[in-house]
Image (cartoon, helix red, strand yellow):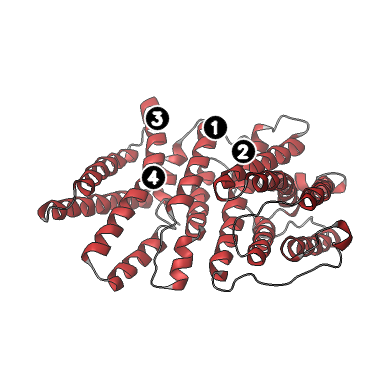
Amino acid sequence: MVTEKKIRSWHLLQTLLQLLLVIFSLIYSLFIHAGGITTFKAFILIILISLQFSVLNKNVNSKLIQCNYYFQAISITSTPIFFFTFVNDLLIKYTNETITTFVLCLITIYKIFMFIPMGELAMGNVQNKWGRFCLLWFIYLIIEIESTYPIPTNPFLKACTNSAIIGSLSFVVTTWFVMKKWGFVTPNFKFSSRVSKVILSILIIFIVIDCLFNGFNDANSLNGILTNWNFRVASNSNLLYLTLNAFAAGIGEEWMMRFCILSFLLKLLQNSSRQIFWAIFLDGLIFGLIHFLNTPVQPLSATILQVINAMTVGILFSALYLYTGTIISNIAYHFLYDLAGMIASGSISMLSPTIFDWQLLIFIVLIYLGLALFLVTGKRKKVVEYNLNLQGLNKKAF
């Protein structure tokens, strides 16, 4: 078990190594008269990394220290963007391709775990619930963004580093410690003992049909929905990249939305008579709205359709998580859904929707909302409440 004392030692060693490496690189750069931009980056990194020692202060109740936790959570998460770019530039400039690839591979693996000290010593000590909520989003977006950089010499490594899979795994590992320190129970990886086998079988059949329909139904009118199918793979050349992207979305988005955010919403609404209803609705709404981030890479009309679809599927995902009591069902559903769409289109972005796409959306919305409502009402609601009690969501965590 990783104790706080060990994590403090880990953070101290990790920060010292970063600082020494940047100082060494700065001296080396100055000696060979490297560009001023590299020197300026090094000075900024030295300042930011040096300040990271401050999270070792144990006086968590001081207002100044509380402010520092926000700053350090952001700083420690953001610094690697510049630090690894800086290291990458030096490796490419002063070493050969083999050494560069080997070092970047080690860095890539280490990045999955490197933010654990930040989560335990900085982010985990933030006490304001809205501050926690905002930090979660910032950390999620930054870790996802900074995890992508190319290692061009190996197809598998290139796919790993170009996709968001490393960032998703890093976010899961980091928030595992953070959410536990905030008083939340980590997700279950087994189905709830109260789940009906009949309903579970129906859900599995529905998920398979929905994923196949999302990827391979080729209908352009309502009349062809049952008959027009095209089971093709658009491109074999980037299949690994698309698979890893779909897996990253399944892991990262479901962990963020169905564990972190939904847990927050359930706690905030713990005194509401419609706690479950409002929690899954707001979770779906947030999940849909974040898909507006896809606007730069696809047509606006496609993004709007995607947002509406994501809102309703987010509500269904939330209901599914609460009923089954396991995050695995959500990760599998999300992964297969995205994978089917990606390998059929050969892209992670959407094309401009047709009139039929908008018509079809109406039916999809009704089906998703109907199934979600079914899972959290009637006898199923007792299963949901039982699962919530197991997760400790009826207790005050703030």
Q: Looking at the image, is mark 1 or mark 4 earlier in the sequence? A: 4
- Quick check: 358 left or right of 37? right
Q: Which residue is mark 1?
A: 129
Which amino acid, mark 2? Phe
Q: Which residue is mark 2?
A: 264
The CA distance from mark 2 to mark 3 is: 21 Å
Q: Position of residue 138 (x, y in %)?
A: 48, 41
Of the two numbered discs 3 and 1 on the same chain, state the one appearing first in sequence.
3
Pointer 1 local density, CA inside 10 Å: few below 14, some 14–19, many at least 20: some
Quarter that holds the C terminus:
top right
> Which residue position is annotated with label 4?
78
Q: Is residue 392 visible?
A: no
Instruction: Tell me the quarter of the picture where residue 248 sits.
Output: bottom right
Relative to 340, 4 lies left or right? left
Tell me: residue 67, above or below residue 105. above
Mark 4 against mark 3, which lies toward the viewer?
Answer: 4
Q: Which residue is mark 3?
A: 67
**Residue 182: x percent and y percent?**
53, 40
Cα distance between the residues tagged 4 and 3: 17 Å
Marks 1 and 2, the one that precedes in the sequence: 1
Q: Residues within 10 Å of mark 2 (few under 14, many from 20)?
A: many
Question: Which amino acid does the dot numbered 3 rest on?
Answer: Cys
Q: Residue furthest top?
A: 63
Q: Secondary structure at mark 3?
A: helix
Hey, what amino acid is under mark 1? Lys
